[in-house]
Amino acid sequence: MATGRTHRPATRSRGIPEATVARLPLYLRALTALSERSVPTVSSEELAAAAGVNSAKLRKDFSYLGSYGTRGVGYDVEYLVYQISRELGLTQDWPVVIVGIGNLGAALANYGGFASRGFRVAALIDADPAMAGKPVAGIPVQHTDELEKIIKDNGVSIGVIATPAGAAQQVCDRLVAAGVTSILNFAPTVLSVPDGVDVRKVDLSIELQILAFHEQRKAGEETAAGDGAQPAARTRGDSADQGPDGDVPAVMPA
Amino acid sequence: MATGRTHRPATRSRGIPEATVARLPLYLRALTALSERSVPTVSSEELAAAAGVNSAKLRKDFSYLGSYGTRGVGYDVEYLVYQISRELGLTQDWPVVIVGIGNLGAALANYGGFASRGFRVAALIDADPAMAGKPVAGIPVQHTDELEKIIKDNGVSIGVIATPAGAAQQVCDRLVAAGVTSILNFAPTVLSVPDGVDVRKVDLSIELQILAFHEQRKAGEETAAGDGAQPAARTRGDSADQGPDGDVPAVMPA
DNA sequence: TTTTGTGAATCGGTTCACAGCC
DNA sequence: GGCTGTGAACCGATTCACAAAA
């Protein structure tokens, strides 16, 4: 690999696995924390611990980006921050609109993690005329009527839907028609979109249901443990690894 | 399979794949919608479309639960709703506490999707003394000092963390010490927990970063398309399939 | 005839383990 | 000696395709 070292990392690029892409933000967060503490260098072992994955996975992930480490030493924190940011497209500015300014929309508008990562809230949009003009997170809410104009004027390509389920598809259609090609959906509905538009969703209650499933199993196990020996049944796997990251995030060209 | 048909679905049970568990809530949502429209029966094809997955996957998923369909006919909606609910443990009542009542915590407290699925918000907890007593979603906020008592009095085993990142680990430790064994973490930090405690997380900005990655690719493609033929490069995969569901949710006994 | 349920094939991701480089 | 980068082995999940059942 690495036939040269031009600006564009030469040969790589044909397909970083989705699972890897889904973890890059995680590494980035851990690296940013290290960077703030002025740590110059990390080993795969340390960084993996900070990101909550195992080190072999992390090294393999990085190997898809290129050879950015130094054997016997580790990775240069600043350099990696830059490489991952660039890979994720965070070195450019992404204007986003948030549609549906209820509690959740407001929470999103106020969320610091966006601004610090290249996302700029270009507009807040809500269907309720009473909301219009009210500032949320310092940004005045605009009425849905303005949606198309806002998208076009600001060159928005990413939209966030935080409306009730009933309104989501309609909002989605309008966003797409106006030129949005990536949608983050918080409404508990399946959106249908034309080819070429990416949808990702976050469903607050799904995660809770998955926890309930395992919680239930735990409760059952205590009683039915009549298998091996100790009270602590089922000592699967290692430690770390957190939640729904080990995604196979299925980007689906939808 | 299915050696009998006792109450407890007999033989199955030894391990429903994680990926399947992660989709059950999705099927449940689609089925609930059908149920409300009084649809008596669905085929795997129809239900799969409604849930945004493909039908082979859905059938395989259901096959792990047992043989609940009728060949040539499809699945009985009500029956399936019940079976999936039971499998997920939603036929029982899960008291949960939400810690950190900012915008996000408030959004969660107000979120209808919880109550309707067996989750009961037992308490809202915040570190700000000024919040104490204020009702949010009809529930008075309590001060962090009460945390341990609340957990114990209500037999809470699931906790939701919606605090700022800095407070999350400490809150997590207290929840776990008080007896919580499942945690849903909205704070952008990796939590470390003892064995036997499940953590799942939702990071609002990670999803956006993943979208940015693909968005960037699209932008690049338009120009660099000099490969195949048509403007619509890379016509991967089928249609449906939405977002971060195709998880490999890595339950990790943490 | 229709549609489920499921082995077998395939695909993608993770883990292992070690050669290569500092 | 320490740590990265990566083939190879492994493992789980998805898809295919068809036999079995209604």
Image (cartoon, coloured by chain):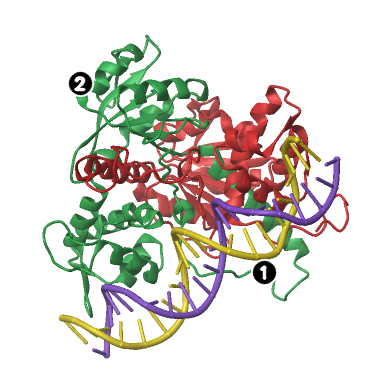
Chain colours: A red, B green, C purple, D yellow
Query: Residue B52's image quarter?
Result: bottom left
Q: Measuring 25% from the left and 29% from the top, which residue is drawn there?
A: B156
Q: Measuring 73% from the left and 23% from the top, which residue is drawn there?
A: A38
Farthest left residue? Answer: B6
B77 to the left or right of A100: left
Q: Which residue is mark 1?
A: B233
Q: Measuring 59% from the left and 33% from the top, which residue is drawn there?
A: A50
In the displayed structure, would residue B234 be above or below residue B25? below
Dot 1 amino acid type: Ala
Of residues B143 and D17, the one drawn nearer to the viewer in this rendering: D17
Residue A122 % position (x, y)? 60, 37
Circle 1 Cα neighbour tier, 10 Å, few/some/many (<14 / 14–19 / ≥20): some
Q: Which mark is residue B124?
A: none
Of labels 1 and 2, the one closer to you: 2
Query: Residue A75's image quarter?
Result: top right
Contact flag, marks 1 and 2 (Cβ < 8 Å) = no
Residue B164 % position (x, y)? 49, 23
Q: Measuring 50% from the left and 54% from the top, which residue is drawn there?
A: A174
Residue A49 % position (x, y)? 58, 35
Circle 2 Cα neighbour tier, 10 Å, few/some/many (<14 / 14–19 / ≥20): few
Circle nearer the N terminus (1, 2): 2
Dot 2 amino acid type: Asp
Is there any visible trace of residue A76 in the rendered image? yes
Q: Chain of mark 1?
A: B
Quarter of the figure that contains the N terminus of chain A: bottom right
In the displayed structure, would residue A128 be above or below residue A7? above
Residue B233 % position (x, y)? 67, 69
Task: State the SS at label 2.
Answer: helix
Q: Are marks 1 and 2 on the same chain?
A: yes
Q: Which residue is mark 2?
A: B153
Tell me how far mark 1 sits from mark 2, CA to CA.
Answer: 59 Å
